[in-house]
Amino acid sequence: MTVEARSPVAGTVVALADVPDPVFSAGYVGPGLAVAPDAGAGRHVVAPVTGTVVKLHPHAFVVAQADGRGVLVHLGIDTVQLDGEGFTLHVAEGDAVTAGQHLVTWDPAAVTAGGRSAVVPVVLLDAAADALRDLPEPGAAVGAGDVLFRAE
């Protein structure tokens, strides 16, 4: 089954290697891309794939497709330290969601104002480093719900 991961936020594509967190930038979590969210339009976070919310925190979530392949979305770097402040969840763990469905509302400008990076890593879990294809170039603009990458 193909994974067609969609951008969870509107913004600008960033190479995963340029994410200011070594766990993501070194690819330890898996291959992917990141999105620097647009301050206004980037407030609405959507599901990257159709599936089930298998893990949900205010700052991060995993949606697994029916075949079990999961996509991790992490809203900002070091945002776990915010203890959920500034994040509004619109789904619960275990919910079935469709790609593009609104899952979380947050304020990336407030994250940046607090001295943290608002960049949003989007990672295909349990995948080989070369599994992704059809990647947009870093610097490309994406809308929430636009295809970010594909994998077989």
Image: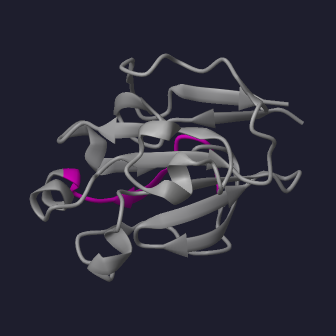
Asked if one can make out residue 84 in the rendered structure from this viewpoint, the answer is no
Q: Position of residue 58 (x, y in %)?
A: 41, 72
Residue 105, magenta (yes or no):
yes
Magenta residues span 97-108
Q: How many marks?
A: 0
- Does residue 70 appear left or right of residue 36 in this picture? right
Residue drawn at (30%, 69%), measured in percent from left and top?
A: 87
Can you tell which quarter of the image residue 132 is in?
top right
**In the picture shown, does residue 49 fall above or below 81?**
above
Residue drawn at (90%, 36%), measured in percent from left and top?
A: 1
Asked if one can make out residue 6 in the rendered structure from this viewpoint, the answer is yes
- Does residue 139 appear left or right of residue 26 in this picture? left
Location of the C terminus by quadrant is: top right
Residue 18, magenta (yes or no):
no
The colour scheme used to paint the residues is: one colour
| In the foreground, 66 or 137 | 137
**In the picture shown, does residue 52 fall above or below 135?**
below
| In the foreground, 80 or 43 | 80
Residue drawn at (9%, 58%), measured in percent from left and top?
A: 113
**In the picture shown, does residue 145 fall above or below 53?**
above
